[in-house]
Amino acid sequence: MLVVCTEQSEVIFIAPDGREVKQTVKVNSVPVSIFCEGQFDIDYKCFVTCRNGAVYIISKGKVESVIQIDSKPIGFVKLDKSLIIAAMDNTLQSFTVRGKKNFSISLPSQIVSIVKMESSRGDTANNVLVALKNGEIKMFNGKVLIDTLRTDD
């Protein structure tokens, strides 16, 4: 299944062969990023961050719930049952997938990117790497800062 977002605030689910639109869901703002999990025909969830500072959770062809964040999103990662969102106000915000806020961390510089760090050992470490404009890369496990790497310009 191919899932695309449009400037018309739509999330479109396209059949694997590319010949048919299986479903179109309208959200209230233009999407910024998306993460989908599950199987379309059985049970799926799509998490869509939008320019209005909201995260729309789509399931079974409709918006199931909306999480409002404090600022506009830069990117996000999903860890088990939580979303870690990098925001334009230099904060890292965590929410449960049901919308309850876990924590918010202020960072010293603009956030450039956020990625989930996978382990080759197969353990279930939930580490997140956050790249900052000042050249630092911060590694978090939940809200705990594990390490800071400094890069040269």
Image (cartoon, rainbow, N blue to C red):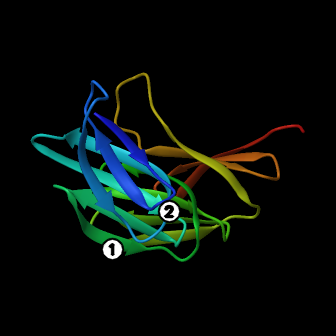
Q: Residue 122 bears which disc, if any? A: none
Residue 68 in which image quadrant:
bottom left
Residue 63: x percent and y percent?
26, 65
Answer yes or no: is residue 115 visible.
yes
User: Residues under labels 1 and 2: Cα distance?
Assistant: 23 Å
Number of disc labels: 2
Q: Is residue 92 above or below residue 37?
A: below
Q: Secondary structure at mark 2?
A: loop
Residue 153: x percent and y percent?
90, 39
Q: Tell me the amino acid under the disc marked 2.
A: Val
Q: Residue at x 33, y 74 (%)?
A: 100
Residue 42: x percent and y percent?
9, 42
Q: Residue at x 81, y 46 (%)?
A: 135
Query: Which of 148/131 is in front?
Result: 131
At label 2, counting other C-alpha atoms closer than 10 Å, the crowd grade (few under 14, some 14-19, many 20 or more) is: some
Q: Is residue 130 left or right of residue 29?
A: right
Residue 111: x percent and y percent?
69, 56
Query: Which of 120/4 is in front?
Result: 4
Q: Tell me the amino acid under the disc marked 1.
A: Lys
Q: Is residue 59 above or below residue 103?
A: above
- What residue is shown with label 1? 100
Q: Is residue 65 left or right of residue 89?
A: left
Answer yes or no: is residue 99 visible.
no
Query: Which of 103/53 is in front?
Result: 53
Q: Residue at x 47, y 68 (%)?
A: 29
Q: Residue furthest right?
A: 153
Q: Is residue 88 left or right of residue 150?
A: left
Q: Residue at x 52, y 72 (%)?
A: 52
